[in-house]
Amino acid sequence: METVKEVKSVDALKELIVINNDRYEGYKTASKETKDPDYKALFAEFSLQSKRFGDELRKLIPFTEETPDRDETKASGKIYRVWMDVKAALTANDTKSILASCEFGEDVALKTYNDVLEEPEEISSELLELIKKQRAELQKSHDLIKAKRDMV
């Protein structure tokens, strides 16, 4: 019989995998929308970071549990990417607008991690350690995007 901790851990894993899928797709979109080679490289790096995060999380889901598809996203993630496409088209690929959209995506990802961390006692210690590590990396990515947006 599964314990509450096991169920909460699996639910947290699934939620974090999906948000990383969203982030991966969002940064792929941002990379396509910008003409700046430095931003293309940065967005590609963050996209790969999300893929790595998702892969690390996937390894912790018990074999008996159904894992989210590798490309499964939240409806809100799809809406975010559509909004970025429209905004980029309207602003002629304005770098500041693309960075603001990326910052919004980082805020959503951080909120998801923070929500999961609100009840750490309900998450296995192995998963908790990984979530904290990934959240710290996300914070650095967020801060970098915000700093770049503020400089444009």
Image (cartoon, rainbow, N blue to C red):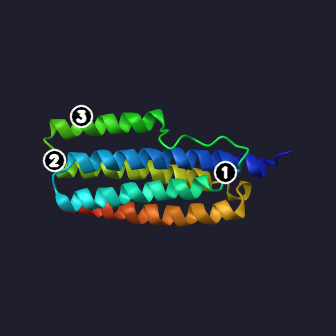
Task: Kindly identify the amino acid type of the residue bearing the numbered disc 1.
Answer: Ile
Q: Which residue is mark 1?
A: 61
Identify which residue, 135 or 34, lies in the foreground: 34
> Residue 147 in the image: x percent, y percent?
28, 64
> Can you tell which of label 1 and label 2 is closer to the viewer?
1
Q: In the structure shown, which secondary structural element does the residue marked by tag 3 occupy?
A: helix
**Image vertical order of residue 87 relative to residue 59, above or below:** above
Mark pair 1, 2: CA separation: 40 Å
Mark pair 1, 3: CA separation: 36 Å
> Residue 138 in the image: x percent, y percent?
44, 61
> Can you tell which of label 1 and label 3 is closer to the viewer?
1
Q: Which residue is mark 2?
A: 94
Identify which residue, 135 or 35, lies in the foreground: 35
Q: Is residue 152 visible?
A: no
**Image vertical order of residue 81 relative to residue 123, above or below:** above
Residue drawn at x 82%, y 48% is: 3
Residue extending furthest toward the front: 63
Q: Earlier in the sequence, mark 2 or mark 3?
A: 3
**Image vertical order of residue 113 relative to residue 22, above or below:** below
Q: Quadrant of residue 14?
A: top right
> Residue 131 in the image: x percent, y percent?
58, 60
Q: Which residue is mark 3?
A: 86
Q: Quadrant of residue 145?
A: bottom left
Q: Quadrant of residue 128?
A: bottom right
Q: Residues within 10 Å of mark 3 (few under 14, many from 20)?
A: few
State if disc 2 and disc 1 touch (CB < 8 Å): no
Q: Earlier in the sequence, mark 1 or mark 2?
A: 1
